[in-house]
Image (cartoon, helix red, strand yellow):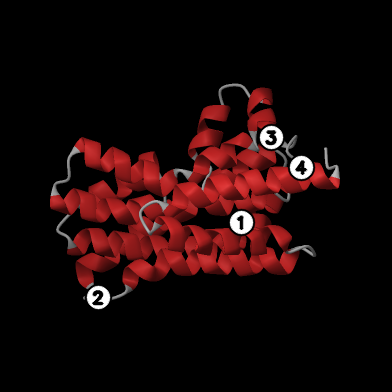
């Protein structure tokens, strides 16, 4: 693989690294506080790698939740990834076996970077996903190590993931000229929160946002 591709992937993912490492540290510390083995933290970061869902998994694992409860919770938390995948069907088709890792590594932060890149540059796309997961794994390892030797007051530490989402939103807002999609997403999410409540708002807001953006795209004549 060319050095310039590796360099570009690192430059693009560097801001994510600064967030992922600290958020993953928070995740590993919470796991340790709940009495769960650091091995579980590492395995989750390697084979699940689902950011917000990993934070939710802390409570699921520590409370002994059943498989059905875990499955429903996972669907609710990660339903947005269905919409991510729909916009990347064409790049998927052009890939071979590597598409399975490409799908596995598609986090929110990775998707936000991919949206600004050439979808035909498969080596770059894969490296972006790989680097981001390696940052998360590194943070998990650091957090597991620190939790063995240092005491943490974990009050509010689970807000780290929310803070990262907020930073990504601000970065995306500043990088584009047209803010209609972002404003639409905020408004529809708030409406769904009021109308459908906290438990149902994620699915409904994603459906409404997708339908609205497709209608807007058709109205503007975008292919």
The residue indicated by pointer 4 is 118
Numbered disc 3: secondary structure: helix
Mark with earlier residue (2, 1): 1
Numbered disc 2: secondary structure: loop
Front: mark 4 or 1: 4
Is mark 2 in CB contact (under 8 Å) with mark 1?
A: no
Residue at image x 31%, y 48%?
Answer: 42
Looking at the rendered image, the quarter that the C terminus falls into is top right
Q: In this view, does 149 lie to the left or right of 84?
A: left
Circle 4 crowding by C-alpha within 10 Å: few under 14, some 14–19, many from 20: few
Residue at image x 50%, y 46%?
Answer: 80
The residue indicated by pointer 2 is 152
Mark with earlier residue (4, 1): 1
Residue at image x 42%, y 63%?
Answer: 161
Q: Distance between the residues labelled 4 and 3?
A: 9 Å
Q: Distance between the residues labelled 4 and 2?
A: 42 Å
Residues 204 and 34: in front is 204
Mark with earlier residue (2, 3): 3
Is mark 4 in CB contact (under 8 Å) with mark 1?
A: no
Q: Where is residue 93 in the image (x, y as percent from the top left)?
A: 66, 24
Is mark 4 in CB contact (under 8 Å) with mark 2?
A: no
The residue indicated by pointer 1 is 13
């Amino acid at each position: 693989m060319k050095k310039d591709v590796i360099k570009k992937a690192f430059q693009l993912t560097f801001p994510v690294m600064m967030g992922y490492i600290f958020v993953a540290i928070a995740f590993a510390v919470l796991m340790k506080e709940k009495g769960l083995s650091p091995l579980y933290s590492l395995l989750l970061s390697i084979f699940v790698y689902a950011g917000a869902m990993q934070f939710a998994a802390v409570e699921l694992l520590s409370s002994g939740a059943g498989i059905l409860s875990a499955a429903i919770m996972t669907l609710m938390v990660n339903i947005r990834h269905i919409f991510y995948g729909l916009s990347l069907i064409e790049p998927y088709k052009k890939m071979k076996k590597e598409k399975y890792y490409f799908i596995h590594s598609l986090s929110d932060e990775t998707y936000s970077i991919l949206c600004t890149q050439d979808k035909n540059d498969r080596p770059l796309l894969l490296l972006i996903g790989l680097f981001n997961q390696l940052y998360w794994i590194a943070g998990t390892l650091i957090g597991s190590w620190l939790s063995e030797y240092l005491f943490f007051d974990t009050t509010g530490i689970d807000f780290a993931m929310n803070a990262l989402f907020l930073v990504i939103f601000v970065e995306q807002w500043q990088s584009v000229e047209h803010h209609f999609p972002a404003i639409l997403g905020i408004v529809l999410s708030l409406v769904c929160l009021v109308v459908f409540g906290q438990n149902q708002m994620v699915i409904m807001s994603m459906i409404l946002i997708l339908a609205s953006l497709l209608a807007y795209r058709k109205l503007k004549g975008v292919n």
